[in-house]
Amino acid sequence: MEKNTKKMVIAALMTAFTCIATMIIKIPTPTFGYIHLGDGLVLLCGIILGPLSGALAAGIGSAFADIFSGYLSWAPATCIIKALTAGIAGLLFKKTTHPMDSAKTRNIRLIFGSSIGELIMVTGYFLYETGLAAFASGGFTTAALAAGAASCASGIPFNIAQGVVGIIICLVLLPVLLKIEDIRNMITN
């Protein structure tokens, strides 16, 4: 029972930290989005809490950041996209974990899983933006979707930059968090 309570408390904290990290420092991009520190926490959610709990914490925390920041129309997509990002990163990290791994091997696993997770984030936002642009231009015709894809392609480099920043933040914070016994036990179990 105590183990489940600790995990729920840590999941709630990770949800809140994800929201705050997404909102606190925003670097606006020319495509009306922003680069933020939240992706590092999204990845940590998946790695620390595991794929399912981590996906829920990351998705909910990121969606709340959109709601509180005035990006309400993005919140449903953000919830799904960030949940998938954390879930895949966490799953790949857990599936390749070995108790005797060195810090270097752990970092390689983290970079691999996180890169796949962030690729999902970049793709997810591109598809959502394309759909929004097509919808705004009158429908989901081939021409509208092609025009939407062309106009939304400019956001891809900024989303890639956001993903890289997230991976770096995760690489910096994970060794610090591993010093906490409960976190270390959650990751290794």
Image (cartoon, rainbow, N blue to C red):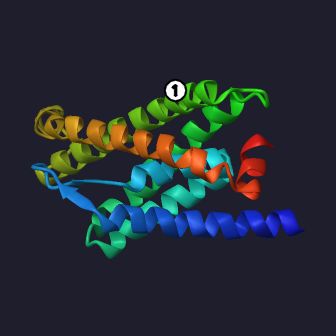
Is 54 placed left or right of 173 in the picture?
right
Please tell me in which quadrant of the rendered image residue 53 appears: bottom right
Coordinates of residue 88 in the picture (x, y in percent): 56, 37
Q: Is residue 135 above or below residue 76?
A: above
141 vs 68, left or right, is left
Return the residue found at the far right.
Answer: 1
Q: Give the amino acid at mark 1.
A: Phe
Compared with 93, 5 (above or below) is below
Task: From the viewer's perspective, tell me whether residue 100 is left or right of residue 62.
Answer: right
Residue 148 percent across, percent down from the top left: 15, 40
Query: In the depicted view, which residue is nearer to us: 107 or 64?
Result: 107
Residue 181 visible (yes or no): yes
The vertical placement of 24 against 31, above or below, is below
Quadrant location, the N terminus: bottom right
Residue positioned 16% across, 48% down in the render: 133
Residue where numbered disc 1 is placed: 112
